[in-house]
Amino acid sequence: MKKVFSGTVYEVLPVSNGIIFSYCKDIIENNTVVAYKMITFDNGRFTDIAKNIYQLTKFGNNYKAAAALSGNYITVRSIILPGGKLFLLSDDGSAQLLDADASQIWTGELKYRGCAAGDIALHKNALWASFPECNVLLRYNLTAMREELRIGGSKSPFSKPEGLFIEGDTAMVCNAASKKLTEIDLNSYAVFDYEDFEEPVHSYVKVGENRFVVLDSGLYLI
């Protein structure tokens, strides 16, 4: 495992040949200064990028309207859906589905037993959400926005599941409390311990053969 960036990283976004991430650059009089970097895989170069590039990557073509509707565009979680639609999840559990022109199609909440979802990911035509305070994952029907399936609960394989990343039929769950990365087969729903860390693991992203995790101390290549 190799540390590639030290400090507080808020979110890592995959792009075609690298990643973009937002991070805490400074704190001035209790105000956080956020900045953005891109890592390009072919040359390993770090590049400072502008806010609009970060927002375009996160929200798509109507990024200005989407960022305005999201409240806090750094902490909101987003999924660009087929047809240019956009699903947004705020840190209080409020959610909205936007059309390609950023008009609202649906608004509601992603909550379980009063607790807000921590992250979201898309698998086929379903939306998965992690619930850190309840140690569960829920699958939602995107058409009806209705809960279809739950993994976890009182005897849960998860321990404060935060970040959620899906590639193919495999979901990777970041367990902040147990400091474990957990793998789920979304065909059989079998759960496996994938990797242990010495710090809480908050998010995971895979781009090609490059795998990254965000820990308390920074961004790592694993």
Image (tube, rainbow, N blue to C red):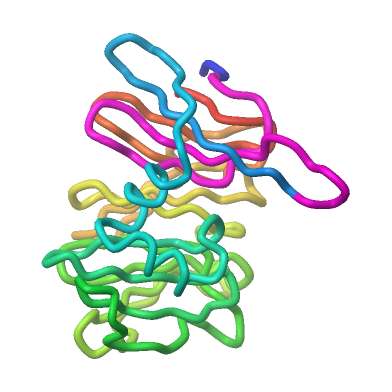
Picture coordinates of residue 206, whole percent (x, y): 33, 35
Which residue corresponds to the image point at 63% horizontal and 47% vertical from the top-left? 178
Report how many numbered discs are placed on residues in the image. Answer: 0
Which residue corresponds to the image point at 78% horizontal and 51% vertical from the top-left? 31
Which residue corresponds to the image point at 53% horizontal and 69% vertical from the top-left? 131
Query: Is 116 on the left-hand or right-hand side of 54?
Result: right
Span highlighted in magenta in the image: 4-31
For residue 88: magenta? no
The quadrant where residue 164 appears: bottom left
- Furthest toward the right, the residue is 29
Q: Which of the image's four quarters has the C terminus?
A: top left
Between residues 102 and 199, which one lies in front from this camera angle?
102
Query: Is 137 on the left-hand or right-hand side of 111?
Result: left
Which residue corresponds to the image point at 31% horizontal and 79% vertical from the top-left? 97
Picture coordinates of residue 7, whole percent (x, y): 68, 31
131 up-or-down from 110: above or below: above
Q: Main secondary structure of the magenta part?
A: strand
Between residues 146 and 102, which one lies in front from this camera angle?
102
Picture coordinates of residue 196, whole percent (x, y): 55, 34
Query: Is 16 on the left-hand or right-hand side of 194?
Result: left
- Furthest toward the left, the residue is 83
Between residues 12 and 2, which one lies in front from this camera angle?
12
122 up-or-down from 57: above or below: below
Picture coordinates of residue 151, whole percent (x, y): 41, 70
